[in-house]
Image (cartoon, rainbow, N blue to C red):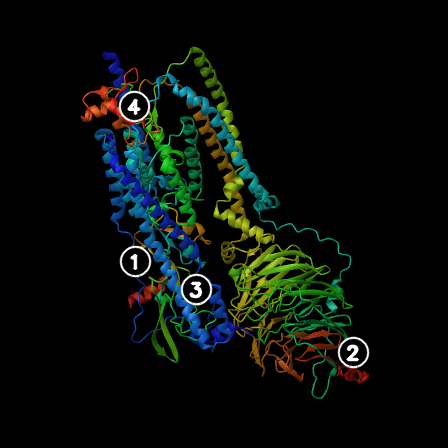
Amino acid sequence: MMWFFRYLLPWILAMAPAALTAGELIPTPEFSGHAIPTTEFPEGPADWRPILDTAALVVALSLASYFALVNRSRRNLLLLTVGSLCWFGFWRGGCVCSIGAIQNVSLAAVDPTYAIPVTIILFFLLPLVFTLFFGRTFCAAVCPLGAFQELICVRSIRVPRWLDHCLGLIPYIYLGAAVLLAATGTAFVICRYDPFVAFFRLSGSANMLLFGGCFVLVGLFIGRPYCRYLCPYGAILGLVSSVSKWHVRITPTDCIQCRLCENTCPYGAIQPPTIDQSPADRESGKRRFVALLVLFPLFLVFFAWLGTFLKVPLSRLHPEVRLAEQIREEELGIAEKTTDASDAFRNTDRPVMDLYKSAIARQNHFGRLGGWLGAWVGFVFGCKWIHLSLRRRRTDYRAERSNCVACGRCYRYCPNEQLRLGFIQDISELVPEENGNLKNEDRRSKTKD
Amino acid sequence: MMQPSSHYYPTVFLTALVAGLFSIAVCVLLWVNYIQRSGNLAEDVPQYLMLKESLRQQPDNAPLREKIRGLDLQLRQEYFRERRFTYHGVFLLLGGLATTLITARWAATLRRKLPMPDSISSRQDPDMQVARFAYPALAVLGILFTGSAILLVLSHQSLPSRLGEMARWNPPDTGLTGTLPTPNPAPAPDLATPEEIAVNWPRFRGPRGDGISAYSNIPTTWHASSGQGILWKAPVPLPGNSSPVIWGNHIFLTGATEERREVYCFDASTGTLLWQKEVPAGSPDSPPPKVTEDTGYAAPTAATDGRHVCVMFANGDVAAFDFAGNLQWHLGLGTPKNIYGHATSLAIYRDLLFVQFDQGSAKDGLSQLLALETSTGEIVWKKPRPVPNSWSSPLVVDNATPPQIIACGDPWVISYAATDGAELWRAKCLRADIGPSPVVADGIAYAVSEFPCLSAIRIDGTGDVTETHIAWTADSGLPDTCGPLVTPDYVLLLASYGTLTCYDKNEGGDPLWEMDFDGNFRSSPSLVENRVYLLSEEGTAWVVELGREMGQQIAEADLGEPCVTSPAFQDGRIYVRGAEHLFCIGLESEIKNQNVEGMAESE
Amino acid sequence: MPNATQTKNRRGFLGDSMRVAGALATCSFFGYLAGRKGRNRELLWQIDPDKCMGCGNCATHCVLDISAVKAVQCFPMCGYCDICTGYFDVGYTELDTSAENQLCPTSAIVRTFIESKAGQRFYEYTIDPAKCIGCAKCVKGCALMNGSLYMQVMHDRCLGCNECSIAVACPTEAFCRVPAEAPYLMKRQAIPLVKKFSIR
């Protein structure tokens, strides 16, 4: 009646005279003239590779800082950008990267069993330290994602500054979500939704390529969309950069308020000087500030409360919770068919109640974490609001510390820089006079068309 | 850099354009290649699989074999060619894109306007301007976030959170250890009483599915060739391997061919065919089942609740008739994926009919256990089963709390709560093709297959009881088809090659004794008092008196035709289905009293 | 204005001290994280063959076009069977190497006759890594018998993604991070057998 017994079993039994029970193996025969080979495996990556990576990072960071702050050379920065893109991007396939390292660090901070490699810690830490002293030079020419976007930006359209402020909140929120999901061992979302890694590896799933393609299309016309509106590491670096010791200065000497650099930054990081407010405006500004301070805690509480409802959707990202739900649905006869995971689970000795217990605990845990995530979102919104209502006097054109990625584009537009480099003899060759006329009329006519 | 050198511009721009168009072309080609290729490895192409299937049926077809090899080679080459295409194409694309970018940037630089500040008169305080737009924009963003969060929450709640439901049933503080609440069964007005069931033979291997007769006045010897001991015999119109079931004076049988499925009702006292009904096709579109000759199209034994008789066939059709032969309902579950043909018999608890519908491989996830209402055929619950196709029949344990239904598969023996299908316990102790049905006696379930052992499992466990509730195992004389026979003192196994092995019921371990019979066996052994009835495929029957030291053969009988079904025992009678006839074997005293008319009538 | 300069200097010094302190604090925190487990060498992805169920996701979910995961043969665990359930399709018509009888869709398993002993023929089965696409069909087949065929991540091909796409799709969480100095795993059952044969 049964194929197995008719064909296979007699043969198994012939092979092994003693009854073969589950888990026992057919012995490997002893051959007279044939040695049992050993399995060959390809070599793993060489020991020196992580060391080389770290060294490359240090060199690149140092060079980038030097080129941006001392050498003030856009061309050198661009060359370094290409170099970094080739090394960290195409050669190393986009991994290890500082942006993704956020997740490893979060996981390591929570999960003591995860032995985080030193390389990853250094990749997370070194750019931070460099930023603390030199500004976001990492973004300028070291980060492969930044380099990629820097190079594809053909023609940039300026995003209005108010929109820039708003969209600039997304990285913080993304950071919160990424840390939460990584620390709970749920998912590494930053890696999963890395738009350019598929290009670095020259292969990837259709969805990854499509997602990346969209970013490339946008990136052709809007400078660094990922860095500005999504990158969670950029958010951290921006905060650190705002207290950095040295930073990119547009002019090598003093600002002469020529406004030539005003529109040159494709990333909208150049801030014009402020104009003093009327006393009435100042009064209303103060009132608004106080009102915001009062509303701030309410904001936090509201968003935290809202976040607790994310319990179910958040927890569904965790494979164990998904498995538990699948098993439950199968038990209740709702699920159409079993999945590989549920079949595999049934083959283990783990009691189903144990799985449920653990999944429910996880779900509740995600409820609490969702609250924290909500509070973080509220905090970010509140801070932005307060930040917008705070006024600081500025007299010069200068690169905003947190947004400037030290690409060095603006240097050459500054007449003082041209003077420093010896391209012009007199500032008035470039700077419009009070009446709006230039000394050099030829230039004027060329800029008009 | 500041001085535009525009006479390069047309060349640079054109280069950028050409490189851009080239990149787009490569991109489109890669994409088309990517879409077309998805899943054309030989194993995923239906045509290839079809050819392979037809080769299996006609293994000597040489041109077909050549065709398969050709197609296989072609598909393989295609697979790797496409991969190579992508690999090289990507580099082309990269080159094209790099050229496009460089030239486009160059062109943009050539055309770049020199900065010209806006006129001063239009200037307002920049931060004020930003703030004016940023506040409302921020509010909109906040609302968007809140909205999408709410949407996310709502969309995930509308799919009911099954875990939430779990949590309500088993609040975490009680430790989730309690059993699931069983919904109160609706009061069923017309159910057979346990006493009624006990004196009938309502399913495969009797009222408890253990092959033990409630009667002791059962004949021990008969000879079909001479007519000795045969009360009557009646021809069964269509072939089938299903065994008879009995309720009162009705004997039910099924028979089928590939095209036709029938149910028969015989009069128990005379052998008259009371009615013969065809079962309409439940799902006309499903393909005809493929069965081996050994299994046939009507292997599942019927089951009755005393009001209806429920039947099942190899094509996955289930139907119920009332005792007058009126079709009550029928249902097509679809042709099961079963390598030998569906052979699992039905079981009934109160008003629920259980269909163990194991099919395919475990990975297919098609196997399930269904509970149907006997009167309407409505599905009350169904549970997916993590097992491949099997041929063992489910067993109802109605004296356990809660009542259980135990079903065997590879590798799990799983017990479900009969009322709602909640899993109670499972044990991993079977392997490969599972034929023998389980038996329960005194709170112990006995599950066996030819591989790897007979396991005695205490049925009061929860969860995976493999490590905790297996009382003992034994591994000699394992059957591939016949179910175990559990007497008050012994557990008996009947291997297909004719060895009857006896174990101590409480200890297992080494056999107490073995007896060999000259025959092959697929009919499960039965017990009357202390006597075991064995029926061989060749039609010889033996009756063995049990003892601790050894069994003693007390009678040999002969049915006159091959037999693979299990007998049914009633007051003073044995009903057994041979290859062509249904036999009624009675006591000598009764035969003497009976007129010979019965015989003549059934012939 | 000496006062202003002094203030500026003081402020600058304060800022610098804060920065250095911040950098040191961060570094020491991460130093703690790194030191907590000792041996923080590079980690690589690998499949725990005892957990792998051979679902075939490895072939389709890897970011590489042809997966970095391939089947390997553990020879000391192999029974050298004539009727290899990892080599032959269930519906084989003959025990030969023709395409219709093979389970492997790319013919990546090489079947070599070794010896005939006591009426039994023994064959060696070797995986050709160039052809293997990691579909795990043979692994599933072999699991019916000895289970000497199993899946491993090949580190000459693996890109070492921070989050392995196959690990995300793996139904049994068989993917784990292993230290780079021992980048391959074997079945628990195989360890004594491999030892036994390597001694000989």
Disc 2 marks a residue whose amino acid type is: Thr
The answer to whether tags 2 and 4 share a subunit is no
Spatial distance from mark 2 to mark 1, Cα to Cα? 79 Å
The answer to whether tags 2 and 1 share a subunit is no
Disc 4 marks a residue whose amino acid type is: Leu
Res A387 label: none
Q: Which residue is denoted by mark 3 in the rendering?
A: B42
Q: Check the picture and name the quadrant holding the N terminus of chain C.
A: top left
Question: Crowding near pointer 3: few (<14 within 10 Å), some, many (20+)?
Answer: many
Element type where label 3 sits in the image: helix
In the image shown, does B571 or A373 lie closer to the viewer?
A373
Spatial distance from mark 4 to mark 1, Cα to Cα? 58 Å
Chain identifier of the residue bearing label 4 in the image: A
Measured as percent of width and height from the top left, residue C55 is found at 45, 58
Chain-order first, disc 4 or disc 1: 1
Spatial distance from mark 3 to mark 4, Cα to Cα? 65 Å
Q: Which residue is denoted by mark 1 in the rendering?
A: A42
Chain identifier of the residue bearing label 1 in the image: A
Q: Nearer the viewer, mark 4 or mark 1?
A: 4
Disc 3 marks a residue whose amino acid type is: Ala
Element type where label 1 sits in the image: loop
Q: Which residue is denoted by mark 4 in the rendering?
A: A260
Measured as percent of width and height from the top left, residue A318 is found at 48, 45
Res B270 label: 2
Q: Residue at x 55, y 79 (%)?
A: B497
